[in-house]
Image: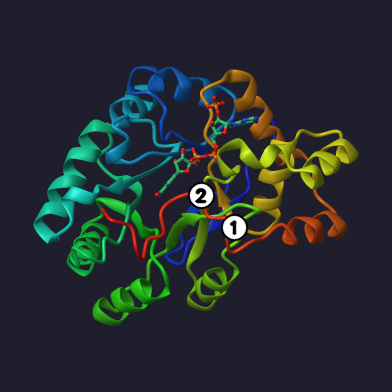
């Protein structure tokens, strides 16, 4: 168990959210309960799952109703629409063994399907009814955000987007800051590819830390919510070890210089075919 103090961010509706947590995308359903239990034993207090990851049951089994671990899950792409979203939420809450969830996100806007405003209205209803403590979105660009805010008057608390040193999303982050939306980084390690980047490797040597710890620390020092995924105990320990040091201004400048318009590794939400 780590004795690090867990940093938190306060969402626009007042809810404190751990700034660091475990992502479980591509964690196999049959090993998810074991991985989440190990993570909680190592001091993790937040888990990011989704109905599309097919492993909510494993998360629910590991946590078994405990409410001191912050659970985020997401509305699946095939569940857009008002009634569909309400039903999908009930299914997720049952699989997660929780009467109320901490944070529910729309996973992708799916602009071609064009039902994300209806879906957002369902999330607003779920929060009003106390079924979920906070609501947000994922993979929304500025125009998607502006549309749901204009049509409902409710601003999402969080937008979870692809974000790592090679793809820093500075323009969208500025818009989030103007509107009080917290930015959450998905694929924060660039799925591991970033960890052999020479600038990161040299900073790690300087601080006697690992490249993953440097990258996670950059997210934390940038005010981002960060959810690195791993299935291995030694990496769970390594990643939570990022809570224990700080980067200096020179490091931050060198990481900022890695940003590239070509750095995206996942789908572009504006053009994704699904
Ligand atoms: N909203 C969305 O559309 C969306 C999309 C993608 C991801 N996400 C969320 O963001 C979370 C994180 O993103 P991600 O899983 O795509 O990528 P990531 O966290 O950037 O990277 C995970 C990869 O890095 C490896 N890794 C983890 N810690 C490491 C370390 N200390 N040293 C070396 N390698 C390490 C993992 O391997 P091992 O597991 O083998 O250790 C895995 O292959 C997801 O799990 C999910 O919760 C959301």
Splitting the image into 4 quarters, where does residue 168 fall? bottom right
Along the horizontal axis of the image, is 83 left or right of 80?
A: left
Which residue carries the number 2 mark? Answer: 265
Residue at 53% x, 42% y is 227
Splitting the image into 4 quarters, where does residue 243 fall? top right
Q: Which mark is drawn over residue 252?
A: none
Q: Are marks 1 and 2 in contact (CB under 8 Å)?
A: yes
x and y percent of residue 101 in the render?
A: 32, 45
x and y percent of residue 56 in the render?
A: 31, 32
Mark 1 or 2, nearer chain start: 1
Q: Is residue 237 visible?
A: yes
x and y percent of residue 85 in the render?
A: 17, 53
Query: Does mark 2 have its CB less than 8 Å from ligand 1?
Result: no
Residue at 46% x, 67% y is 12
Which residue carries the number 1 mark? Answer: 167
Residue at 61% x, 36% y is 192
Quadrant where the image shows the N terminus: top right
SS for dot 1: loop
Q: Residue furthest bottom?
A: 150
């Amino acid at each position: 168990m780590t004795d690090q103090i867990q940093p938190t961010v306060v969402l626009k509706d007042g809810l404190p959210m751990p700034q660091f947590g475990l992502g479980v995308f591509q964690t196999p359903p049959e090993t998810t309960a074991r991985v989440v239990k190990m993570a909680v034993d190592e001091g993790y207090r937040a888990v990011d799952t989704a109905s599309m990851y097919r492993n909510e049951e494993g998360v629910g089994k590991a946590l078994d109703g405990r409410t001191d671990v912050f659970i985020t899950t997401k509305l699946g792409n095939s569940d857009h629409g008002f009634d569909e979203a309400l039903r999908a939420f009930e299914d997720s809450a049952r699989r997660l063994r929780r009467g109320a969830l901490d944070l529910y996100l729309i996973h992708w806007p799916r602009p071609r399907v064009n039902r994300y405003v209806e879906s957002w209205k369902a999330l607003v209803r779920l929060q009003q009814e106390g079924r979920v403590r906070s609501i947000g979105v994922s993979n929304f660009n500025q125009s998607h955000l502006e549309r749901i805010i204009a049509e409902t008057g409710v601003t999402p608390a969080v937008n979870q987007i692809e974000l790592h040193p090679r793809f820093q999303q500075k323009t969208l982050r500025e818009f989030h800051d103007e509107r009080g939306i917290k930015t959450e980084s998905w694929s924060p390690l660039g799925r591991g590819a970033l960890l052999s980047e020479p600038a990161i490797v040299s900073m790690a040597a300087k601080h006697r830390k690992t490249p993953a710890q440097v990258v996670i620390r950059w997210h934390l020092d940038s005010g981002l919510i960060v959810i690195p995924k791993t299935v291995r105990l030694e990496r769970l320990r390594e990643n939570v070890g990022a809570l224990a040091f700080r980067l200096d201004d020179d490091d931050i400048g060198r990481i900022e210089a890695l940003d590239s318009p070509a750095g995206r590794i996942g789908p572009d939400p504006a053009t994704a075919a699904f």
